[in-house]
Image (cartoon, helix red, strand yellow):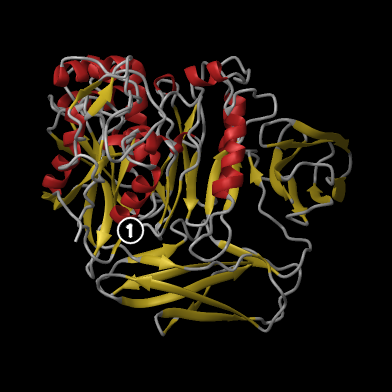
Amino acid sequence: MRALYKFVCFFLPALILFTTSNAEDILPKYQTQAEIEAYQMQKYGQLRGQLSSDRMTDSCDGICGEQAPSGCWCDNDCVQHGDCCFDFLDVCGNQPDVLEMPEDMWVPGEFEEVQSVLLRWPTSSSGAYRRLYTALADAIQQEAEVWIVYSGDTTNVHNMMDMEGKTLYNHKFLNVPSNSIWARDYGPFGFYHGEEDELAFIDMQYYPSRPLDNDIPQAVADMMGIDNYVMNLYQEGGNLMVDGFGFGYYSTGAYDRNPIWTEEIVDDYKKSTFDFHSVAAPLRLSCDGGTGHIDMYAKLIDERSILVTEYPEEVTAQDRDIINDNIDNHFAPAISTYGTPMEIVRSPVPNRDNGDLATSCGQINSDARGYVNGLFVNRSFIMPIYSNNNSGDAEQDSIAIEYYREIMPGYNIVPIDARLLTPMGGAIHCITMQIPADNPIRFWHPPVEGLQAAQSEYNFKSRITNRSGIEDAELRWRVNGQAWKSVSLTDSMGYYVGSILNPGFTVMDTIEYYLHAKSNNGKEMTKPIVAPEGHYRFWFETGKIFLPAIEYSLDEDKPLEISVYPNPTSTNINIYMKYNGFKPLELSVTNVLGETVYQSGVSFSGENVKTIPVEDYSPGVYFIKVSDGDSHRISRFIKQ
């Protein structure tokens, strides 16, 4: 048995936290040295010394740390001060008492269904805060209920929404104060347990210098009437991501928060608490705004794909090499729940407002911009951008938005200007915390995707569960964007199985499919969650596969159509163009950084195919744009 702290609580949906002091709004995401020193003086009457690399489990002697929130420490002369027993130790030298967690628990991924999002509304009424939070609250309430934690007159929140031309309609208020806006780090971490998939929280210990923030998980749990399990370990929510099937990722910053314990002890404690079968601890970044959190540069898109920031070669900051090493040593070697290597998807980095790229550690650290630090809310992804109608590099943001639509097919991409947050060490993800859905339908499904061998039938399997059982499960599929057909999935030894018979598919055919399930208590869910707009797809051999292009023209006559094949490719890319106009066309190819790698003029009317050699291109995603000056089409291909 393994638990010390367990509290009974209440149920909530998307959450916004409010406090009463404007000064609280300016606390950065990281714990400041002033906070640390104030806490030390208040609790012990004197200050600690410098950080030591030594970690010992039998004594505090020799441990000099500025990261450890309390316990004992050594001063600059390595004279020991404070209580040699750490906060959570009954006897000096013991490792932390493990929590007695419920049996049969599982922690969902952020990309799974949520009932709400935790968001702490700022006390500042400045225009910058108002615009950011009203846009964020409005985007969330389209997908889930917004819970607003606010200790003042809630009319103020409604008034701020009204000032921005938005109505707050899908929300609740919780009258609880807090110290800071960084709800991701101190908010409750939801998980399910038991045959009924009961929701409960893991309460991760935040900064002791922000006690009101530390009270939030229990307050939310009390409102929801659910259990809250308090960890005996310091951990921020922004430094933890999970795949939904027992694999946890966090940076080595987790060890820095708990310097009295060895890395093995910290890993084992998290495995026990979160029921992880595996963990990965990539090296923390040095230039990410001060926290070392993994969410500043990496995000699980689903249970088998990790989105990771990619710095261009001209970036001299050490984080470029750290990220690449983390991919090689931690992300790429990770194995998904389906027994396949994790797919690594790279993300571009934003420019500064003047269009220049931040290249040095100092430049990046002072304003740690990134597109990865966004928020999944059911069928939407709220994405941080760094421009508006008046300032910033809007062109680069536009390219990044389209790229995210490509790598997250089916999601509603909602861009929000996050420039207020990044100088403080965070972005959209850092000020929000999802609350998992009630009554979940859970899918485990190894997708059939990409190039497939020709065969008489294609078989599919999935584990689908719900507290009430599954009434009906089916596979819905179509060929080349035609009408959807359905195949019933049959329960066979714990798996739902079914097949698509091959009626004579050709190399011209692309099969698209998704899963749909209905529970005995009436709930319906799909896999992927964004189906049918987002779905799985496969084909039979490299051939002319028509991918839907992205159209920006408002011309209803659609004078220009394009398709690319083969896709993916390693040698040549063919661009099929159909044009009923007479103007010269401009054809260009750009990479995800917005750099033009090919440009050419084309003149024809009717149909034409342009072949471009791409053998020398670096592997990755490229965008093809064809324009006649009035309308243009954009498609993408993958260079292997």
User: In which quadrant of the rendered view does residue 621 lie?
Assistant: top right
Q: Residue furthest right?
A: 603
Density class for disc 1 (Cα within 10 Å; few <14, some 14-19, many ≥20) is many
Q: Does any portion of residue 124 appear in the rendered image?
A: no
Relative to the observer, which residue lies in front, 482 or 411?
411
Picture coordinates of residue 171, whole percent (x, y):
22, 40
Residue highlighted by disc 1: 275
**Vertical position of residue 22 compared to residue 3: above or below:** above
Please identify the quarter of the rendering in which residue 156 is found.
Answer: top left
Amino acid under disc 1: Asp
The residue shown at (55%, 48%) is 331
627 or 454: nearer the viewer:
454
Residue 194 coordinates in the image, percent (x, y): 23, 67
User: SS class of the residue under badge 1?
Assistant: loop
**Residue placed at 32% from the left, 14% from the top?**
77
Query: Relative to 516, is 459 above or below?
Result: below
Quick check: 621 left or right of 338?
right
Whether residue 369 sits left or right of residue 508 in the image: it is left
The image position of residue 499, as x and y in percent, is 55, 81
Q: Is residue 541 left or right of residue 592?
A: right
Would you identify the image quadrant in which residue 600 lies? top right
Depth check, front residue: 469 or 602: 469
**Residue occupying image coordinates x 39% and y 48%:** 264
Q: Quadrant of the image for the N terminus?
A: bottom left
When the figure is inspected, residue 183 is found, relative to residue 423, above or below; the finding is below
